[in-house]
Amino acid sequence: MHIALPALALVVAVIVVATIARRVGLSAPLLLTAIGALVSFAPFMPSHFQVDSEVVLLGFLPPLLFSAASSTSLIDLRRDRRQIIGLSVLLVLFTAFGVGLVAWWLLDVPFAAAVALGGIVAPPDAVAATAVARRIGLPRRVVSILEGESLFNDATALVTVNTAKGLIGGAAGAATIVTAGRDFLWASFGGAAIGFVVFLVLARVRRHVTDTVTSVAISFATPWLAYLPAEEAGASGVIAVVVCGVLLGHKAPVIQTAQSRVSERLNWASVTFLLENLVFLLIGLQVHTIVHGVEQGSLGLGRTFAISLIVLLTVMVLRPIWILSLALVSRLSGWTSSALLPRESVIASWAGMRGVVTLAAAFLLPDRTPEREALIFIALVVTVGTLVLQGFSLGSLARMLNLHGPDPREDALQTAQLMQAAVTAGTRKLEEELASQDAPVPEEIVTALRDQAARRANLAWERLGSNDPDVESPAESYRRLRSAMLDAERRKVLAMRDRGIMDHEVLTAVMDDLDVEESMITRMSNGENEIQDRLLLTPEIRQFGCNHLNDAPMTADPITPEGCPDCVREGTQSVHLRLCLTCGNVGCCDSSVGMHATRHYEQTGHPVMRSFEPGEAWRWCYPDSLLG
């Protein structure tokens, strides 16, 4: 019980504080760290509270890295590889040796110990940076690069710390330095190789596992299946976990069932939520113990704190110097396609919040390390200082630079394009299946399949546009009525359950089916987006996808600016309006009863239309089904 009650208290505290932070718009990691620091000085706290480094590095780090890696795009990592390598490897080394020089000068410790401190404070935290970045709404590319950096920088830092630890107390001769370099290379490339081998084995296994519970259980074991063999071989377990996680996430649609993917995402979301927030609470709870250790040391609290502030300033300055210089070199070298914009480089250079790995690595320093307590205290000041100074000011800096997340309407536009392409492929497959059938399929089944596919595509398109809020679109009508039907169906099932006239297994299966359908309806309903002030254009990389789009103008004079004349004549309601860029005809979208824009294309062959809704300027090619 002496372990169970504190563990339960920590979990409850995380849930309560994170919920409050979400409601009031604060960053949960920052709030948890502050509360933990205050609680650490409370009378009921033990005089010595320290989280074992092995608990963090073995218990917390592998699952957190695997969860982040498995949801990271391999395509994005490949696209931003120069930026990610520059930040996760070169910047970590640059910071480690830069801080090492400052600490060596101020603390009068061996250079190996100073470099170990540099490696400890060098890597920004995976959770803190991306949590704050997503909360304040940074551009997606910046968040992607920060996530990619955080996946690999812990490995570089831990390898640097372990290498420096081996040199503490010894002579750093040429042979020793060569050995350290060899160990560094083996840790990096060996870890990647082991992670790749584990991926190959697990991918083959998971192809043959169709049971959802077993598949999720395998995913929970995967971080340690990659981490432990790599560490045992002297390689980087962090790199092994990241490589294995990224590759398994990339191949998940092929090697896993749909049910296991959905269940895995939900289970990992809950685990990650607890672990991510728990580590910041643990950081705060160690503050009193670390401060007390420095007070008993030879340097004293005042001098150590002054040195800590200098190291904190060094850490915060070295990152902008590196990132802004890297952006300049990238542009001078012609790597403009992979380089961040100047404003993006500035915001990325300020997103350097440190986290629990920094403190865990500090406690890994051997007891014989000179001024060990001071080094741990410096790591704490850097962690808390970056969390507070950079974490709280990052949003203001983003607003000052006019940086924001992607326009939600642009996401809706791309979602609609992707859904339309998928539905078109499914409809084409339906026609092929019907043509190959020996016996005719009942027409009502074919009609139901076609209507269901069209409804899914139309619902995605209806999320665009500024239609009259007093007029209900067909998809909204379906969603409202089907939700009411599902509610009645569920009440009936529950009534039969309460009367005890059905087996529990049968009731559970029916309830699961109802829940799945309702969750899909709710998900689409929650995806509604507010209209923003700026004009919604086609994403630049998709503006010219075919000859029709290349040849079509960007606009045309509408024949009937007031709306769809066919809808007026037929007495039907338009949902969204489309403008033909060949003749200026205005027609309603496919969610409308008349579908007059599509009918106009079928009658005239005019290939390209443009949205005629306020604030939108995206185009659509009918023959090629492409945005432009």
Image (cartoon, grey):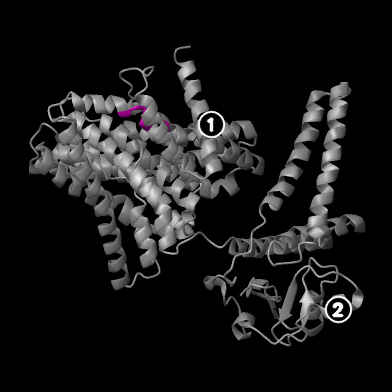
Give the quadrant of residue 39: top left
Q: Which residue is drawn at 73% across and 76% down?
A: 578
Residue 16's tag is: 1
Task: Estimate the x, y position of residue 568 in percent, counting from the top left.
Answer: 87, 77
Q: In this orientation, does residue 258 appear?
A: yes
Looking at the picture, which amino acid does disc 2 mark?
Asp
Residues 90 and 321: in front is 321
Please state the horizontal and vertical placement of residue 42, each as a whole percent of the image: 37, 22
**In this view, 531 is above or below 565:** above
Q: Position of residue 494 (x, y in %)?
A: 83, 29
Q: Main secondary structure of the magenta part?
A: helix
Secondary element at tag 1: helix
On screen, residue 475 above or below 213: below
Left or right relative to 332: residue 30: right
Instruction: Specify the farthest residue to the top.
Output: 1
Q: Which sits in the foreground, 479 or 172?
A: 479
Q: Which span of residues is magenta-colored? A: 280-287
Which residue occupies the foreground of this view, 496 or 161?
Answer: 496
